[in-house]
Image: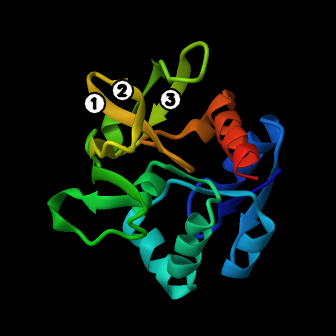
């Protein structure tokens, strides 16, 4: 399975490594034309406003909406989760607007409030190590969205069909099981 990682900003190499450990082949995607050669795409963390601007500049908005429309899986982590959301707290304009959820940016606080914890994630047998860095929060989801993990009663991982979103950075640990779950989604979509 070829899994692309949107290479505009963020932990691209770390996601490619996790995809490899999970049994896939990670590819840095720098141009929209490359989307035709991948079975799924990871939108990594970084700064969501910057990622959105770069996606617009390089022609990724419509290309990614078409990619999603074709049923190809997309996995957004941290800022990537914000990019996927249909609604952003505070009335900001959404970027891709693909996933039926409302998201609050930096909901867990600033850089110094970053933390790690073990999370129970539906579909993964034992707790997963999660790294939260200026993390967003999923405030609410539509009926078509399945909540996969919560932290202190707040939603931090969700799935809507072929879309997967996590508030944290799974690529910053040696636990690649969430990437494995995404690879399974890509296999099913294929």
First-in-chain label (2 vs 3): 3
Could you say which is closer to the camera, residue 62 or residue 19? Answer: 62
Give the SS element for disc 2: strand
Q: Position of residue 128 (x, y in %)?
A: 56, 22
Tell me the crowding category of disc 1: few under 14, some 14 to 19, or many 20 or more residues within 10 angstroms, Cα based.
Answer: few
- Relative placement, left or right, of 111 versus 40 is left
> In the rendered image, which residue does mark 1 sit on?
154
- Please report the residue visible at 58 percent of the width from the left and 74 percent of the height from the top: 66
Which disc, if any, is residue 130? 3
- Relative placement, left or right, of 67 versus 166 is right
Marks 2 and 1, how far apart at CA: 5 Å
Asked whether the residues under the numbered discs 2 and 3 touch, taking CB atoms below 8 Å apart as contact, a structural biologist would say: no
- Please report the residue visible at 50 percent of the width from the left and 29 percent of the height from the top: 130
Marks 2 and 3, how far apart at CA: 11 Å
Is the residue 20 above or below the residue 64 in the image? above
Give the SS element for disc 3: strand
In this rendering, the count of numbered labels is 3
Asked whether the residues under the numbered discs 2 and 1 touch, taking CB atoms below 8 Å apart as contact, a structural biologist would say: yes
Foreground: disc 1 or disc 3:
1
């Amino acid at each position: 399975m070829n899994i692309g990682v949107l290479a505009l900003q963020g932990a691209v190499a770390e996601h490619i490594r996790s995809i490899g450990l999970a049994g896939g082949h990670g590819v840095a995607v720098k141009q929209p034309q490359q989307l035709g050669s991948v079975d799924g795409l990871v939108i990594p963390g970084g700064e969501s406003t910057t990622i959105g601007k770069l996606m617009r500049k390089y022609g990724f908005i419509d290309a990614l909406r078409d990619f999603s429309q074709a049923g190809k899986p997309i996995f957004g982590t941290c800022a990537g989760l914000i990019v996927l959301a249909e609604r952003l707290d505070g009335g900001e304009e959404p970027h891709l607007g693909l996933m039926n959820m409302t998201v609050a940016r930096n909901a867990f606080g600033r850089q110094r409030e970053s933390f790690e914890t073990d999370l129970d994630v539906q579909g993964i047998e034992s707790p997963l190590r999660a790294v939260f860095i200026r993390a967003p929060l999923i405030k609410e989801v539509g009926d078509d969205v399945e909540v996969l993990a919560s932290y202190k009663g707040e939603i931090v991982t969700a799935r809507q069909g072929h879309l997967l979103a996590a508030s944290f950075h799974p690529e910053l640990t040696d636990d690649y099981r969430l990437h494995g779950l995404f690879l399974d989604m890509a296999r099913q979509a294929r």
